[in-house]
Image (cartoon, grey):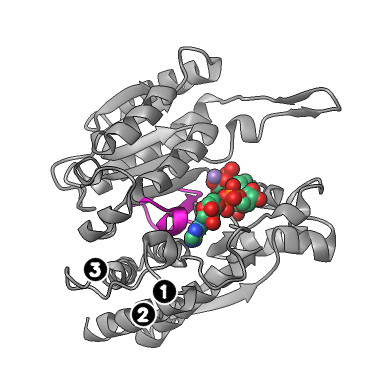
Amino acid sequence: ATVFKILVLPGDHVGPEIMAEALKVLDVVEECRPAVKFERTTDLAGGCSIDQHGVPITDAVLEKASQSDAVLFGSVGGPEWAQSTPGPEHGLLQLRKKLDAFANIRPCEFLAPSLIEASPLKPEVARGTKFIVVRENCGGAYFGDKREEADVGSDLWQYSRPEVERCARVSASIARILGRDGDGKGGGGPAVVWSADKANVLASGRLWRRATEELFRAEFPDVELRHQLADSLAMFLVRNPRAFNGVIHTDNTFGDILSDISGGIVGSLGTLPSASLSGVPGKGRCNGIYEPVHGAAPDISGKGVVNPVAQILSLAMLLRYSCLLSEEAAAIEGAVAHVFKSTDAGGLGIRTRDMGGQAGTREVGDAICRVLREALRSA
Ligand code: NAD
Ligand code: IPM
Ligand code: MN
């Protein structure tokens, strides 16, 4: 059997609750596909690691991560670690840096047309939204030199040309894979890439624009590139999300914010997955960190009501990018859509509260496993 080494870092609060469901889904894949094995190691990251070891992630865990094929990450943080420096979130940043996971891919779409009702937007505005935020993940203000004193706080927001270029290569490659038709097979030619920056104010933004423009001209002349200032893009994205169908190519800070706006568009952060890759997708296996866009949701943890789907779809991304198991990834996505879809539309209509349903975390996870098992057995 082909063996993939997966480091599992459930994290804090809802992290372990959603991770338990994702691991059940992985069990089903393993059960139905005897030719692949997932060798799993579970460890600490975030607040739980601070409690145990005094730091949000240990060197030993970082080392294990670099020796794994992929890291499945839950979510970290919570009010109980508000006073600790470094905080739980710093562990995640160290992990991204250690794996050089420079491209954070965050898709936003409705899993089924009947889920448009979960959006706060008018159905005619929300319908058909399908874009992917590609967020630079190892540079910018997050990783620039810092100064932290009683009365001064500063973060150097800096980019170099190679940092922008490698992210631009991922954005353009994703645009080719996604396609203008959004079918994931490049249908209709490459999708449009929207580059979001603040070139009107920030020197780093002017570099972002220049380096992206030149890279596309040299290596991706077939991919249409459009520039939009990040602030107005945020406004248009809410007013008419479909206008950005394709790829949004942006820096670390703007990408963080724009990907949470995605949660507002679909109605909940609970379904949005992400992949942080250390290479260009479509060119063989990538190492990566797979985690929900959302955080540790301390306001709802411990109640069995958290939506596990962002974690489960992050697992699907892991199978696609780190294991090249695209059929199994698509089967998971299909199972999620079927479970969520309304009964009118032929689905099961099983949803957590954030999606307007009443089901608990485990109920949703179990239903996805059931549907997936059937799909994988008959395929
Ligand atoms: P959050 O994303 O944790 O929660 C925002 C809101 O969305 C909350 O009301 C929450 O209940 C809801 N929500 C989030 N995920 C949900 C799900 N799966 N199902 C249903 N509802 C869901 O953001 P926050 O409250 O600002 O941050 C809480 C903590 O998480 C902070 O410490 C923050 O730093 C951390 N955080 C961690 C990560 C990560 O580990 N990747 C990401 C973002 C935030
Ligand atoms: C995210 C989170 C992280 C970020 C935090 C927890 C470090 O908000 O993954 O979006 O800001 O990148
Ligand atoms: Mn965020």
**Crowding at mark 2 (Cα within 10 Å: few <14, some 14-19, many 20+):** some
Quick check: marks 3 and 1 in contact, CB under 8 Å? no
Quick check: marks 1 and 2 in contact, CB under 8 Å? yes
Q: Decide: is 369 above or below 294.
A: below
Label 3 SS: loop
The residue beneath circle 3 is 342
The residue beneath circle 2 is 367
Label 1 SS: loop
Residue 71, horizontal then vertical, whole percent: 56, 62
**Amino acid identity at mark 2:** Ala
Say which of marks 3 and 2 sits in front: 3
Left or right of residue 302, residue 333 in this image: left
Q: Decide: is 150 above or below 27.
A: above
Q: Any magenta on residue 70?
A: no
Disc 1/disc 2 C-alpha distance (Å)? 10 Å
**Amino acid identity at mark 3:** Ser
Magenta residues?
A: 267-288
Camera-side residue: 265 or 289? 265
Location of the N terminus by quadrant is: bottom left
**Crowding at mark 3 (Cα within 10 Å: few <14, some 14-19, many 20+):** some
- Residue at figure coordinates x 46%, y 65% from the top left: 307
Q: Any magenta on residue 273?
A: yes
**Amino acid identity at mark 1:** Ala
Q: Earlier in the sequence, mark 3 or mark 2?
A: 3
The residue beneath circle 1 is 359
Q: Which mark is residue 317?
A: none
Say which of marks 1 and 2 sits in front: 1
